[in-house]
Image (cartoon, grey):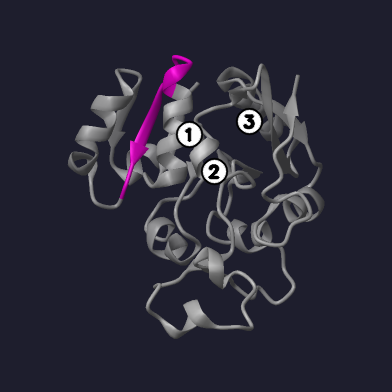
Amino acid sequence: MNIGIIGSGGLGSNVARALARNGLSATLSTRRGPQSLAALVAELGPTIQAGTVAEAAAADIVLIAVRWEDLGQALGPLPAWNGRIVIDGTNPVEFLDPDSPDAQDPTNPLAAYGIKAIDLGGRSSSEVFSEFVPGARVVKAFNHLDVNVLAQPQVSGGQRAMFYAGDDAAAKAAVREVLDAIGYFPVDLGTLAVGGRLSELPFGALSSTQFITI
């Protein structure tokens, strides 16, 4: 499997850990350059290599693991996607400075978590996300769980359920193979318009929900 990861924060690094623990190869990237990932890839082992964002984006399956507000800057300079598979691991939330007025806003139900929802005008996040990756076959996955558990697909004698959604059957099948190989129990939620909304943070009905198959 030819996998690229754009973003090396909690999401990108923990998916890379899950891949590494199952002997799967990937190219991990960040806008800060490959040299900034030296310590992390040394920890992850030989199957995970550091690369440029362009190198990661050239993979057959590419996980986008950057903050919502960074999507334009991270993806704007990249060439056409030409039908390659892009996993949308993002959520439309803004991370707040703890000293900012927004962090103390009593009208924000998420202030205690250090985030606030971004108003998309009634559109689903994957609909908006798809505009950043024209020509890609988008599958939403890796976005409904706490990033700190992503590297632990097997727990309590069972498997964590991983929701995924998309409009292209072949693309979803390829992503399901990745989820299977990592050790998750994949659950197909249907199309982006339906399943994407169910799993997206912060208000999707299945967001932050952990199911474990025994």
Horizontal side of 21 relative to 170 (left or right) equals left
**Residue range corresponding to the magenta coloring:** 20-30
How far from the left and from the top, in percent, is residue 27?
36, 31
Residue located at (30% from left, 17% from top): 46
Q: Are marks 3 and 1 in contact (CB under 8 Å)?
A: no
Residue at the spot of label 1: 15
Residue at the limit of the structure toward the left, as seen here? 35
How far from the left and from the top, in percent, is residue 83?
59, 41
Mark 2 lies on a secondary structure that is loop
Residue at the spot of label 3: 175
Q: Are marks 2 and 3 in contact (CB under 8 Å)?
A: no
Q: Quadrant of residue 158?
A: top right
Q: Nearer the N terminus, badge 2 or badge 3?
A: 2
Q: CA distance from mark 3 to mark 1?
A: 13 Å
**Nearer the viewer's eye, disc 2 or disc 3?**
3
How far from the left and from the top, in percent, is residue 188?
78, 35
Callout 1 amino acid: Val
* Mark 2, other Cα within 10 Å: few <14 / some 14–19 / many ≥20: few
Horizontal side of 94 relative to 198 (left or right) equals left
* Mark 3, other Cα within 10 Å: few <14 / some 14–19 / many ≥20: many
Q: Nearer the N terminus, badge 3 or badge 1?
A: 1
Callout 2 amino acid: Asn
Residue at the spot of label 2: 82
Residue 125 colored in magenta in the image = no
